[in-house]
Image (cartoon, rainbow, N blue to C red):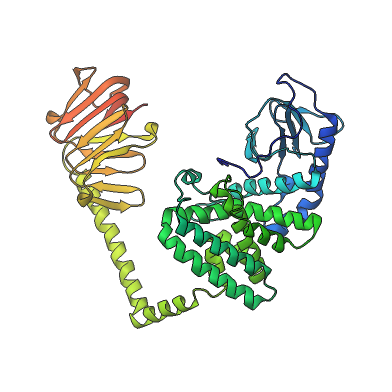
Amino acid sequence: MLRNHSYFALTLAVAAAPAAAQDAPADTVARLAQVGALLARLGPTLGPDVWPGFRPDTIPVVFVLPGRGSVLLNWAGTPPEGYAPVAGVAGAAWRSEAERGAASTSTVLGGRAAAQVVVDRLVPGELFRVAVHEAFHVYERAAARDGRSFGRAENSFLVTSYPVFDADNEAGVARESRLLAAALRARDAARTQELARQFLAARESRQRKLGPEYAGFESDAELNEGLAEYALWRARGATEGGAVRDTVAARLDSLFADPTRSVRLRSYATGPAIALLLDRLAPGWKDRLMSGTSSLQDVLADVTGYRDAERALREQARREQGGDALARQAQARVAELHRVRRAQVDSVLGRPGLLLVVAIDQLGGVGLCGLDPQNLLQVDRGVLLHTRWVRPCAGGALQAEFTTALVQDDSTLRAVIGKESEVRITVGGEVATVADGERREAVEQLEIASPVVTLRAARADVERDGRVLRVRPKR
């Protein structure tokens, strides 16, 4: 998982040893092995209780001692390259290293996902909670699916431009954190729901002014870091007991206490707070979140009835305006649109003349250095029809301009470029021909020109099959 900053990237309290190879510190490994044992003992029951399908006991954990080395626990089989088994500690391995910039995060070792924890002090209970947090990130990534919100990470680079100096927005965030804290502290369900709805009203009003990009950053950070932190708090409750909701509420009270902390860290407080509210209000909320595209606040809005009036008005409008008939008509129009657009593609590619096919798979796709939006049509998912002009480009590897219809998809550009007598091919500045059935590999400085196209590729394979001239530019 890519993270620019980690709440758990803690400073090592033990003096760093020289970077030279050194033996595994026996006392340290023994203390860390207690964390692995705790994961193995509690994971089978704690994990699914925290989240459906979550099993932290099945996820390897690497504990990093900056400047000294790494201890790998719960690894089944031969340790990954660079790690050696630790005598007397089953499932433990050691790697001597001087990695001073490590952060607590999820990582990959030997092709296997693992949780990584930077060690501050050797307190097994504390390290256990951080390990659960990072193991949850491993689980999130494994469970992520296209079209679902669960497992989606926020765009962390937005911390570079998030409006931290906007006083109105900051006041709104403070108001929301107070409402969330009050909802967590409320002792009856009715008052909890009332405060949760006030929170949603305040947040949605602020986020409309904030804009969809930054609002999405907030929501996605709560899904990503907020839910992992929720797993941490649930782990703390399982091992230490106590009122977790009150502790999380106290963190919300101090959301602005440290101005040196990144704005991204707010999700570590707001995310678990919303999740704990949902635990109280709707025990089945997790399955719902995993199956759709909702954010945490969306699910909270549904379970508290926050959008009931909106839903009722929408249903009334659907009935009164012939919603079922309109839906059937729209489906028929979309089906006809697909048919017409596909027929357009068949028509433009079926014109007489040489058909140029540019395979762009080795370029990883192409950009568009120019297009005519008035004459650009969507044909299907990922398929575009440029009806009169477009300039595809891929740096120095490919530059082209078409003044005729061109079909673009994820792997090819296709256009009829004129009669064969009108097409001029040069390689390295010399006129060249490509006969039917001929293939030329890795030609340099390829240029193709006709009245409707100019194409330059620094290096490409070229082949001819009947009326089809295929070009595969290379990086």
The relative height of residue 318 versus residue 343 in the rendered view (above or below) is: below
Instruction: Name the image quarter holding the N terminus.
Output: top right
Residue furthest to the right: 88
Horizontal side of residue 227 vs 384, given as left or right: right
Residue toward you, 432 or 364: 364
The residue under the point 68% across, 26% down is: 81
Residue 332, by quadrant, is: bottom left
Instruction: Name the image quarter holding the C terminus.
Output: top left
Residue 339 x, y percent position in the rendering: 27, 58
The relative height of residue 80 versus residue 48 in the rendered view (above or below) is: above
Residue toward you, 145 or 409: 145
Residue 264 x, y percent position in the rendering: 55, 49
Residue toward you, 184 or 130: 184
Residue 153 x, y percent position in the rendering: 53, 48
Residue 56 x, y percent position in the rendering: 72, 48
Residue 185, by quadrant, is: bottom right
Q: How many marks?
A: 0
The residue under the point 65% across, 32% down is: 110
Residue 127, by quadrant, is: top right
